[in-house]
Amino acid sequence: MSLASVAGPSLASIFGLGKESSADAAALKSMSLYPQSTALANDPMYWQAAAVKATTSAGPRFASCVAVAPTLVIGAGHFTPAPGALAVLNEVVFGANHNDPNALRIPIVSWERFPTYVYGNPNTVDLGFYWLAEPIPGFTEPVKFNSTSIGQVLTMVDRGNFGDPSTGEQLSVGDAMAGYAPRIPWNVSTSYPDSLYDYMDFNGGNSLGIALNVQGLNFSSGAPWYNATGELTHLLIAKTNGIGIGQSVCLELNNPVVQAELAPRIQASWEEFCQPGDVNHDGEVNGADIQPFTDCMLGEGNLCGCAEMDGLPGLTPEDMTAFISQLLTND
Ligand SMILES: [Ca+2]
Ligand SMILES: [Ca+2]
């Protein structure tokens, strides 16, 4: 199955992918109103941010999440049902409003917690993996992760929010929200392994005097944080007012401990649906795959599983021969 074979609306048509982003750090700092925050949340730069629906004994709930590979979405581990729990994760919804009947929805087929049930346990990490039934249409570029410096202003995009009258946001709409906050080192508690976490100060009570424009978000757990160039930096794991007043604990996604869990799952997702030779993951085997294939042969490529052509592990001259043969056949 290739990415191109998936029916339904493409993310490009929904989000206008390819359009130049208007977001930059200066714009984030000047943003203070709800319409501005929703406009920011809908910036194509943040298209991977989504909402995850769970059915619990209390009914359906939505939380934020973010796609990191064609069939892999991550969210807050504490929103992820424990093994044997009655709660079920149903689907991931893309777009500005998770109640929109026309929104792109992809069923969830399985989920995991890393490493086990999480929130409140000092020995665990609050991270959930949600596996999708089919690839997200238009997901052809690997997500980039990056680390940030203390004090750097980052953007959170919240797709799971259900409304806050104090900001003018409608209740129960499930529309997108975004905000910004500076990264602060997490060192005020012994309940978490410090090296994995930061917190973001939403109240302006930090040394930078920068306040978040949106307040009182609920079900923001799992919301991704981005730097000014759209690289993923953190995952929100405690809702806005969950820890202290207006502070949120956030997991560092680029931390080696987290990346050690993420990387093999991301690799597996890219390889699950690719056709041999489609090394740039655009659904076709053609000349555009030559450079990434060559990079993989030289040991310099990313996500090289689709360069495997001969069914034998490892990239060898036999893979090269089969790749060239495939190219000639397709031409
Ligand atoms: Ca290709
Ligand atoms: Ca091989």
Image (cartoon, rainbow, N blue to C red):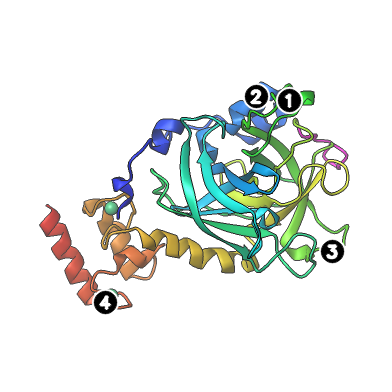
Q: Nearer the viewer, residue 174 or 297?
A: 174
Tag 1: amino acid: Ser
- Dot 3, how many residues are within 10 Å of its Cα: few (below 14), some (14-19), or many (20+)? few
- Residue at left offset 69%, top offset 49%: 57
Q: Position of residue 206 (x, y in %)?
A: 86, 42
Residue 143 visible in the shown view: no
Label 1–label 3 contact, CB within 8 A: no
Q: Earlier in the sequence, mark 4 or mark 1?
A: 1
Label 4–label 1 contact, CB within 8 A: no
Q: Secondary structure at mark 3?
A: loop
Label 1, label 3: how many angstroms apart (C-alpha)?
33 Å
- Please give the count of numbered marks on the rendered protein: 4
Tag 4: amino acid: Thr
The residue beneath circle 3 is 191
Picture quarter with ligand 2: bottom left
Q: Earlier in the sequence, mark 1 or mark 3?
A: 1
Tag 2: amino acid: Gln
The residue beneath circle 2 is 36
Tag 3: amino acid: Ser
From the viewer's perspective, is 174 left or right of 217?
Answer: left
Label 4, label 1: how many angstroms apart (C-alpha)?
56 Å
The residue beneath circle 4 is 316
Q: Nearer the viewer, residue 82 or 160?
A: 82
- Residue at left offset 44%, top offset 32%: 14
Label 2–label 1 contact, CB within 8 A: yes
Mark in front: 3 vs 4? 3
Highlighted magenta segment, given as a residue range: 204-212
Label 3, label 2: how many angstroms apart (C-alpha)?
36 Å
From the viewer's perspective, is 318 left or right of 5?
Answer: left
Q: Position of residue 115 (x, y in %)?
A: 65, 69
From the viewer's perspective, is 277 left or right of 271?
Answer: left
